[in-house]
Image: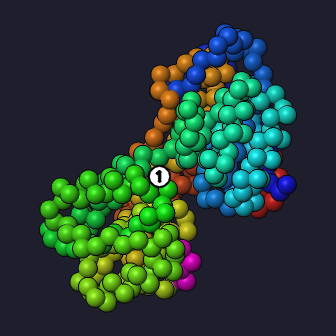
Amino acid sequence: MQYSGVQFKGVLAAGCVLGAVVGCERSASAPPKAEEREGTIALIGASIDDPLWRVFYATAYRELEGYHSIELKIAAPRIPSVEAQINIIRTMRKSDLLGMCIQPVDPVALRAELEDLRTKGVMVVTLMNRVPSDNAFLFCGLDDLAIGEAMADAVAEWIGQSGTAAVMLSKRGDAHHNMRLVGLRKKLEIAPSVSILAEMDCDGNVFTARAMMREYMERFPRLRAWVTLGDWPLRRRKPGERFLPDTCRLVTFGPTPANWRFLEDGTCYALVGAAYDRVAAHAIQTCVTAIFGDAPHIRSYLAPPLVVKADNLHAFRARWFRWRELPLETQSTVLSTETRKP
């Protein structure tokens, strides 16, 4: 098994105020008092190359900064792999595990493993991807419906008084894409300035998406905007390569560092995402709250959309790097154990 893992001894102070956080189930028997609870919270990422991994684990360290008796252990596969995540879970559960926050690579494939973990009394919180279960897992992720609506608003803003647009989707898309499409259609129905000429299925293929867009632009050169539910057209792009004319802009999902240059070169009008640090923060707060034996009143947290454009990219870039900051006392430990930078 190959994965990158590090750990940090955090401090858990009794009676801390967590505010409105994700809901947790109260155990059948009353838990020990907070000062008697000692153990581990595990954070498992999708892969060390996932751009959100560093944001997630840095946020987790900050959330536990200054607390005692709780050890934070983090790990992620080198590449997205169900088998690797299962191996990590089984390694983590050998310790005095109290809670686990995981970004599951394949929610269905990991369901049995996580349900078994929960029956052993471990608080399980899933990040970004919901795990289907008769007894729903606690969840922290994105509000994909609102993200789709924000995409529609960005398209209408770019087009102005009147113009045409086209939508690129994938029928094999996951629940995230489906919900974004619902939000997008809902908002565009009441946007009189935007006329949608076509919805096309690229099957989630990078090269198919770009080829279909180029071909359609040849037929309709006055098209003003494209909306894609995933950032397929931006992947594997060579520096300086353009596939849209200067009069047309792309609105898509994913304001990660690899996509910032497409705002700068004018390919994209907007990249829609969320405050990703809040996803990890609420997940950690959920575990902490459960360890204290409290029962928050909600079972999921959905981070609202955040729209990044050329005029606020500088501020968002600074914000992104703040999300990645580690507490000073953990920097040498964490960074020295990383074999590759997430």
The structure residue drawn at horizontal position 55% and vertical position 43%, both measured from the top left corner, is 130
Task: Tell me: residue 300, above or below residue 85.
Answer: above
Tell me the quarter of the image containing the N terminus: bottom right
As drawn, 283 above or below 179: above
Q: Dominant secondary structure of the magenta stretch? A: loop
Q: Is residue 100 above or below residue 317?
A: above
Residue 337 appears in the rendering: yes
**Colour pattern of the rendering:** rainbow
Instruction: Specify whether 267 is left or right of 91.
Output: left
The image shows residue 99 at horizontal and vertical percentages of: 70, 31
Instruction: Give percent across and percent down for residue 31.
Output: 69, 13
Depth order, front residue of 334/210: 210
Label 1, on which residue?
A: 175
Magenta region includes residue 201 = no
Q: Is residue 106 above or below residue 217?
A: above
Give the magenta part as a residue range.
Answer: 235-239
Residue found at x 78% / y 22%: 38
Which residue is rendered at x = 75% and y = 18% of the image? 37
